[in-house]
Amino acid sequence: MNGGRVTIKLGGIAGAHAGSLAVLAARAAPGWVVVHGGGDDVGDWSRRLGIEPTAVDGLRVTDPATLEIAVAVLRGLVNARLVAAFVAAGVRAIGLGGADGDLLVAERFDARLGEVGRVSRVNGSVLEALAVEWIPIVAPIARGNGSELLNVNADEVAGAIAAARGGRLLLLTDVPGVRRGAEVVPELTADQAEAMLADGSAADGMRPKLRAAITAARAGCAVAIVDGTDPDAVGAALDGTTTGTTVIAAAAAGIG
């Protein structure tokens, strides 16, 4: 599927995988928006500067010093590298942070997390204006109150953008899909995904992915959580072939 509104979230590991990036670059088309993470890079730079990363509910705790690192690494290093990779492959890519064009506005929601927000508004007109000819590549840094910046989980940014735009959401990660025990679950309803969050069977980094999937699915998007390190899985997902875990708003009503 080369056309239509597609929001793609690249995890840090998936985003660094040359084979998958090549598939995405070859298939990129107007109507796409790419959101990237980069938590491993932020963690590495934090440690270099003497700050040991910590997390709560799968989200990075961000004090003021860590926020400066996150902005520099995500909006700077990671975003620039991804844009360069797409441009080198012939894609008209443009890098954005949430403050650019007032694209993302966020609000703090958990005092334990510090300088972390949850998206409260997406300025979709910016993306739609660009997406006619460009592939926006979005770093997960949002504007908070006034001119402050907030760190936002990239999965949740992608979910909010997909919900605002409609179409499809592909969450590319480093696992084959959502697991229950040792098995990958091929399909979840939003209610089932919420139950996995509530009972703890979804842990660590899968928690924000499920929250993003729930947000987008309930807004009418087709959602898939896919192994972004597997180029074949990425290509199949772009074609609309069932792979990984799909998340739907609700199960179809039975007939009878």
Image (cartoon, rainbow, N blue to C red):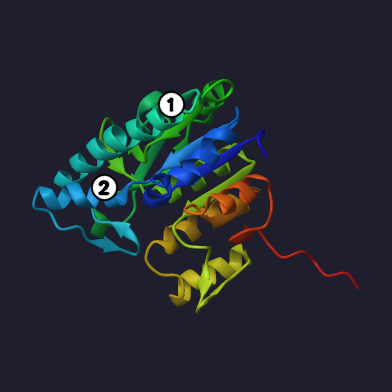
Q: Residue furthest right?
A: 256
Q: Helix, strand or loop at disc 1?
A: helix
Kind of residue indicated by mark 1: Ala
Kind of residue indicated by mark 2: Asp
Residue at 80% from the left image edge and 66% from the top image edge: 253
Q: Residue furthest front?
A: 19
- Answer few, some or many: residues within 10 Å of disc 1's Cα (few below 14, many 20 plus, some between 14 and 19): few
**Quadrant where the C terminus lies?**
bottom right
Q: Residue furthest bottom?
A: 181
The answer to which of marks 2 and 1 sits earlier in the sequence is 2
Q: State whether residue 195 appears in this view.
A: yes
Nearer to the camera, 241 or 106:
241
Left or right position of 64 against 230: left
Cα distance, mark 2 to mark 1?
22 Å
- Answer few, some or many: residues within 10 Å of disc 2's Cα (few below 14, many 20 plus, some between 14 and 19): some
- The image quadrant that residue 77 belongs to is top left
> Percent x, y for residue 194?
53, 67
Residue at 68% from the left image edge and 40% from the top image edge: 1
> Percent x, y for residue 207?
43, 63
> Percent x, y for residue 195?
53, 72
Nearer to the camera, 86 or 102:
86
Q: State whether residue 115 appears in this view.
A: no
Disc 2 + disc 1, Cβ < 8 Å: no
Nearer to the camera, 68 or 90:
90
Left or right position of 220 against 133: right
Left or right position of 171 against 78: right
Residue indicated by mark 1: 88
Residue indicated by mark 2: 41
